[in-house]
């Protein structure tokens, strides 16, 4: 099994009410210095091996026709090593930051 | 309790929708409804608080996630910890979970749609501040309306809720959102804080609701207040 | 506009002064959709060539969408033929008409289309459609209290419908639910003619006290113009970007990408509603206008021409979401969730305070001046100097050619009388099941369950009842009822009659619930006005609706026209959607549709003739559309309405359901399922059972009468001359037609409820 | 300005109806071989420089207390180079795949 990640974000020119709401809330919570927030979707797909060019092209097609609404969204596709996520109190490894 | 009527506050957050209805339900139950504003730290001497339904802050990010940080929530948290009856309906339930006053969380309905239906429920715990006017096992019908109404928690938490009798109400016939163990409402360990996904406040008048089965939630609280005064 | 070589290079800003100095500079008026005579007219009005910004304003405001240039001469009839009505407080012309419903209350309501955007991006298109109509209602000074959503999609099993419908429904729900407006009715119709061109109409109704009516006008020199709500982005500016790229004559001056689709922000709109209503309550506002199509161009020119003076706008003050916008684009932007208010200077601070309370961005962008010009300024330069009326109201008026299409005769000659019909009881039974389970007649709860109908706590009736009903006053029980209807099949067969039938049905639906119909709003969805056949359909529908409103005494208070609803050469059925508003003094007297009491007597009111042209049966059984639609009898509709209202008021009936598409049997099945009771029916003498069940004769309703009221009720009908035939009794758990067939409710329910989910899940 | 990306995913033990719905739809659309789909959120934050350890710690705190609900969600925080996204017909660069 390989993990493919598809990130889907609203195109930059499209209004992102969710990101805006988050951004506006931050100062109230004491977080300053964040000038913009965009909120999008992240899909993690477990795909059967081998993940060759053909398979990846299929995933890209899937992203374009289904996971993203390309009228308003852009996307990226990439193969990813599984990372460990932080949980509450998170001393988890995180990704390189 | 101050004076004659029980005073129950209803908080309005930006995007609250059923606040007016909650106030009407409180009045219908014989209480005095007090409008509270999210930016206000003051509870204005109310004896109990309702966090109403709606889409606070558009439910952007997560339902209840932004509202939880409102100034008034600090006072609500303090009150709740010292025994004040607090009820969260729908979005209010979500705010209570986000505030960690109640365990678990509410996630997207399993069928992914908003659903508005008249829903049969069984009252499982008739001893909370908001359910004493029911009997355990009583079946009632009130509307549900939500898109993020699926109650989730880890198994241990669910088991603990069951064991401690903290499941307040359960869906019957049909689980409208994929809630674990058909949970429609839960309470905290002391029974003063209740989160309820179904909208009891929309079942207080046969003209505008499917039944009057929801009235008991508000009369219960008023009775609790009298008892404790 | 790639070849710019021939044009004189322009400075980066096309000011009024610059326009005066460069009279020969050509502007891309054709690309902005203007016709040569229109451009000439603009030059004549201004006495010079327009600046880029002026051209932007004229081009959007003189577009079909904003100027109603093709439809205006036909819509005029709604005014000239308007019936005398004491109820009308504000007539056609404002954002929405206002109707007096008594006790000091006024109601405003309007239906609008968002068809094309909903095809491109179903969720956002439908969502922003709801947003737009709600702002229209707030702009009248009213608190919105409910929405309805008349919808048309392609064939139920077509892949395009699967793409469009779920998104449209989720968008309407997503936006309306988040605003906290109950959805109390609407329509869902499937027909292949709407493939590639769904119709997404949305109706909003609002309530106010008489003294709170606000109009779009900017009077009072020195008054401030405040823009509030969302920041302005590059939404919906189409042609203006082109103008900008023309004006900014350098490669990197080209505007960055402009959104192809607008995204709605219902939370922002909810805040907009709350802060507007609070400002109304404190009587801070002199004039108000929503920003919809044509954005600031529309708002400023309409406010200015509605008032007595001129207006000066500082465009630099407009808060932007995208700093690369050119002034032309800012003027044209259709960014959602914005409003404009005109305030006396000493009220501005308080107004801004209210906006701050609701976390709504608000900015003073201009003021009312004592001239009669609308001027717009940018970076210290004047870029617009126009008489506002010429922008807002003096758009072109076209008398487009129209002609009855050649195919109309053949279509009308294709009489359904020749179609084979069910004869035996068994066949009738099968035909009933086929009808009840057909997508157009089946339950729509998969859709309507996605709408909040309870919020605000005043919903007395909602789908699937004949009309939606909202309580207005808790003390007195005063309420309003609304229904929308529009049968495109009927209108295709005969657009004049079709429009009247749409009105008849909506009128009847309102009366069936016990409310007295008062006023009308309409959304006219038609094909290209450049096609004489579509234009004829449009003209006929307007004439039909105006004539019928006159007879029924219900004025058209406002509405919307949507043209160019076609894919290639193929237009949708002419689809006039008519919304009727009624008033009821005491909502506790409403008449629901459910047959809730066993033993009650069923009466069919009205006359049944053999009328199957355009019927649901001809569609379901034969896929046929031909012949003539059912005959219209407006006097009968009025009488039926009076009887239904009287019967409700005096407690003579317990349930009523109007008979429309699908005929009597559809109505009876729906009322039985809702009431969880069966019915035993008997065919009255002299009628063929098939016609009895499936005919779509108008002016009919089926009512359930308690036995104790039978004599009083039939006496009333007899005295008033309304035919009332006893057709059966509420009984058991089956729908039975004596001597023919019986159908268990369980089987009917299964058939009725499974269709739509099966198509969409 | 630096871009920080916060990915938020439901914990593995929490049911993900959205991811499931996507996964179930794929075969119908002709995409085979995807055995699991999880749908989460991606936040792109524009943060004022300098983005030192202190600033990053603040972002992590923000993710933990606000962007994610750690009762049901895990998160990762990382600083990211802006990537070009694919749009419809996407021959965009995409990320390394
Ligand atoms: N899109 C919709 N939104 C809300 N209600 C709807 C919608 N479509 C249909 N309904 C409701 O379903 C019921 C049945 O619709 P319909 O058969 O069109 O009614 P009628 O034939 O009486 O006009 C009505 O109450 C109508 O308002
Ligand atoms: Mg009807």
Image (tube, coloured by chain):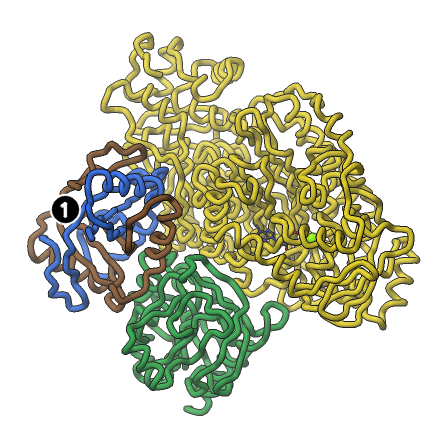
Chain colours: A blue, B green, C yellow, D brown
Q: Secondary structure at mark 1?
A: strand
Q: What residue does disc 1 label? A: D80
Q: Position of residue B121 (x, y in %)?
A: 50, 76
Q: In the shown orientation, is residue C454 left or right of residue A46?
A: right
C9 or B214, nearer to the observer: B214
Q: Position of residue C316 (x, y in %)?
A: 32, 34
Q: Position of residue C45 (x, y in %)?
A: 51, 17
C11 vs C306: above or below: above
C157 or A1, nearer to the observer: A1
Residue C143 seen anywhere in this rendered image of the structure: no
Name the image quarter holding the N terminus of chain C: top left
Q: Is mark 1 within 8 Å of ligand 1?
A: no
**Looking at the rendering, which quadrant does residue B183 occupy?**
bottom left
Task: Please rate how many residues cluster around mark 1, counting C-alpha atoms within 10 Å: few if below 14, some from 14 to 19, many from 20.
Answer: some
Q: Chain of mark 1?
A: D
Q: In the shown orientation, is residue C732 left or right of residue C204?
A: right
């Amino acid at each position: 099994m390989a993990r493919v990640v598809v990130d889907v974000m609203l195109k930059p020119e499209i209004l992102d009410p969710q990101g805006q709401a988050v951004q506006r809330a931050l100062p109230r919570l004491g977080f300053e210095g964040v000038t913009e927030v965009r909120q999008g979707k992240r899909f993690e797909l477990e795909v059967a091996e081998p993940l060759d060019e053909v398979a990846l092209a299929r995933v890209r097609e899937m992203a374009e026709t289904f996971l993203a609404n390309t009228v308003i969204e852009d996307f990226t596709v990439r193969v990813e090593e599984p990372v460990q996520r932080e949980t509450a109190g998170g001393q988890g490894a995180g990704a390189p930051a | 309790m101050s004076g004659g009527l029980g005073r129950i506050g209803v908080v309005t957050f930006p995007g609250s929708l059923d606040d007016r209805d909650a106030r009407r339900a409180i009045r219908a139950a014989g209480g005095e409804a007090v409008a509270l504003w999210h930016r206000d730290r003051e509870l204005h001497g109310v004896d109990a608080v309702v966090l109403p339904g709606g889409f606070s802050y558009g439910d952007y990010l997560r339902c209840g996630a932004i509202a939880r940080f409102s100034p008034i929530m600090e006072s609500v948290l303090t009150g709740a910890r010292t025994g004040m009856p607090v009820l969260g309906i729908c979005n209010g339930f979500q705010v209570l979970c986000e505030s960690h006053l109640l365990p678990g969380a509410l996630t997207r309905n399993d069928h992914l749609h908003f659903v508005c239906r008249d829903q049969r429920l069984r009252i499982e715990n008739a001893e909370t501040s908001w359910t004493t006017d029911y009997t355990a096992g009583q079946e009632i019908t009130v509307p549900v309306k939500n898109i993020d109404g699926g109650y989730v928690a880890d198994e241990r938490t669910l088991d603990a809720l069951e064991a401690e009798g903290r499941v307040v109400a359960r869906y019957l016939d049909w689980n409208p959102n994929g809630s674990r163990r058909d949970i429609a409402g839960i309470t905290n360990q002391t029974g003063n804080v209740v989160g309820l996904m179904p909208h009891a406040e929309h079942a207080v008048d046969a003209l505008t609701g499917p039944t009057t089965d929801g009235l008991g939630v508000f009369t219960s609280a008023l009775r609790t207040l009298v008892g404790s005064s | 506009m790639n070849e710019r070589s021939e044009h004189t290079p322009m400075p980066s800003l096309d000011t009024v002064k610059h326009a005066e100095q460069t009279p020969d500079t050509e502007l891309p008026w054709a690309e902005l959709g203007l016709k040569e005579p229109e451009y000439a007219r603009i030059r004549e009005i201004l006495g010079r060539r327009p600046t880029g910004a002026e051209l932007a304003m004229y081009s959007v405001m003189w577009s079909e969408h904003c100027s109603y240039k093709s439809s205006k001469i036909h819509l005029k009839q709604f005014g000239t033929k308007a019936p005398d009505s004491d109820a009308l407080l504000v007539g056609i012309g404002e954002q929405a008409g206002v109707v007096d419903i008594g006790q000091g209350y006024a109601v405003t309501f309007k239906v609008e289309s968002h068809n094309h955007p909903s095809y491109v991006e179903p969720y956002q298109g439908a969502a922003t459609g709801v947003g737009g109509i709600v702002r229209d209602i707030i702009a009248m000074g009213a608190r919105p209290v409910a929405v309805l959503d008349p919808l048309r999609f392609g064939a139920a099993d077509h892949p395009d419908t699967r793409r469009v419908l779920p998104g449209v429904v989720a968008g309407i729900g997503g936006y309306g639910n988040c605003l906290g407006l109950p959805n109390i009715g609407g329509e869902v119709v499937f027909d292949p003619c709407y493939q590639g061109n769904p119709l997404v109409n949305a109706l909003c109704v609002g309530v106010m006290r008489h003294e709170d009516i606000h109009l779009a006008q900017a009077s009072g020199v020195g008054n401030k113009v405040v823009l509030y709500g969302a920041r302005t982005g590059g939404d919906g500016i189409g042609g203006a970007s082109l103008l900008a790229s023309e004006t900014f004559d350098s490669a990197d001056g080209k505007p960055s990408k402009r959104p192809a689709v607008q995204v709605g922000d219902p939370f922002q709109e909810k805040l907009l509603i709350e802060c507007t209503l609070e400002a109304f309550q404190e009587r801070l506002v002199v004039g108000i206008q929503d920003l919809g199509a044509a954005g600031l161009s529309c708002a400023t020119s309409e406010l200015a021409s509605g008032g007595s003076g001129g207006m000066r706008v500082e465009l630099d003050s407009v808060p932007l979401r995208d700093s690369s916008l050119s002034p032309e684009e800012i003027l044209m932007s259709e960014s959602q969730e914005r409003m404009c208010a005109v305030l006396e200077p000493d009220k501005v601070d308080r107004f801004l305070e209210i906006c701050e309370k609701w976390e709504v961005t608000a900015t003073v962008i201009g003021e009312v001046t004592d001239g009669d010009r609308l001027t717009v300024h940018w970076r210290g330069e004047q870029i617009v100097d126009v008489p506002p009326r010429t922008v807002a109201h003096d758009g072109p008026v076209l008398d487009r050619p129209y002609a009855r299409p050649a195919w109309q005769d053949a279509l009308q000659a294709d009489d359904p009388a020749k179609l084979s019909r069910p004869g035996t009881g068994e066949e009738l039974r099968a035909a009933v099941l086929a009808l009840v389970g057909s997508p157009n007649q089946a339950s729509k709860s998969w859709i309507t369950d996605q709408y909040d109908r309870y919020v605000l706590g005043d919903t007395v009736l909602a789908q699937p009842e004949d009309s939606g009903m909202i309580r207005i006053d808790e003390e007195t029980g005063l309420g309003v009822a609304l229904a929308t209807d529009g049968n495109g099949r009927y209108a295709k067969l005969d657009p004049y009659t079709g429009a009247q039938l749409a009105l008849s049905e909506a009128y009847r639906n309102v009366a069936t619930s016990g409310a007295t119909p008062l006023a009308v709003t309409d959304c006219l969805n038609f094909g290209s006005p450049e096609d004489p056949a579509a234009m004829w359909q449009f003209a006929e529908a307007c004439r039909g609706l105006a004539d019928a409103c006159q007879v029924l005494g219900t004025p058209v208070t406002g509405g919307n026209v949507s043209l160019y609803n076609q894919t290639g050469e193929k237009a949708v059925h002419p689809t006039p959607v008519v919304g009727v508003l009624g008033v009821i003094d005491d909502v506790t007297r409403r008449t629901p549709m459910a047959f809730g009491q066993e033993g009650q007597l069923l009466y069919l009111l009205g006359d049944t003739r053999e009328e199957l042209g355009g019927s649901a049966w001809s569609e379901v059984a034969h896929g046929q559309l031909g012949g003539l639609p059912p005959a219209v009898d407006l006097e009968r509709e009025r009488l039926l309405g009076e009887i239904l209202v009287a019967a409700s008021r005096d407690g003579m009936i317990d349930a009523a359901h109007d008979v429309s598409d699908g005929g009597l049997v559809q109505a009876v099945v729906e009322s039985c399922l809702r009431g969880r009771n069966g019915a035993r029916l008997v065919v009255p003498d002299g009628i063929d059972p098939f016609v009895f069940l499936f005919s779509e004769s108008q002016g009919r309703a089926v009512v359930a009468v308690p036995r104790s009221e039978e004599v009083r009720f039939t006496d009333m009908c007899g005295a008033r001359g309304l035919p009332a035939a006893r057709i059966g009794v509420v009984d058991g758990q089956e729908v039975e037609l004596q001597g023919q067939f019986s159908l268990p409710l369980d089987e009917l329910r299964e058939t009725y409820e499974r269709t739509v989910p099966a198509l969409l899940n």
